[in-house]
Image (spheres, grey):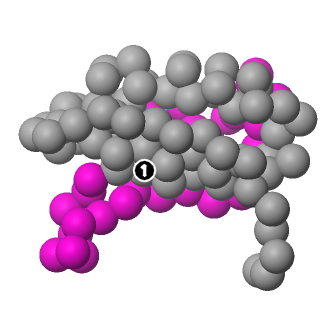
Amino acid sequence: MLFAIHALDRAGALPRRLENYDAHKTFLSDTSAFGVSIVMSGPLIADDGTTMIGSLFLIEAESREAVEAFNAADPFRKANVWQQVNITGFLRRQG
């Protein structure tokens, strides 16, 4: 099943995001311990086209619980970068 993780940064979180970026990238490089697979992911950006304001993931997993465990272990989550995280099922129609 596919799941979308939509995470919005806290106000002023950009420095904290950048401090934890390498740990976040390393974490995402091997998701096998959580039984999830990243279909695609990347930062959400402001209207200026460059300022990072959040994260978006499309995850394949057997259960919502696996996605929640994966997200809880993310260095950005642990560093309190995100103010709001929504995890929802996703039904692919195109692409």
Residue 28 colored in magenta in the image:
yes
Could you tell me which quadrant the C terminus lies in? bottom right
Q: Secondary structure at mark 1?
A: strand
Residue drawn at (39%, 57%), measured in percent from left and top? 43
Q: How far from the left and from the top, in percent, is residue 67?
A: 70, 32
Which residue extends farthest bottom? 94
Residue 23 against residue 61 in the figure, above or below: above
The segment highlighted magenta reads 24-53
Residue 50 against residue 62 in the figure, above or below: below
Give the camera-side residue of 2 and 14: 2
Tag 1 residue: 55
Looking at the rendered structure, the kind of residue marked 1 is: Ser
- Residue 24, quarter of picture: top left
Q: How far from the left and from the top, in percent, is residue 79?
A: 31, 21
Residue drawn at (31%, 33%), measured in percent from left and top? 83
Residue drawn at (41%, 26%), measured in percent from left and top? 77
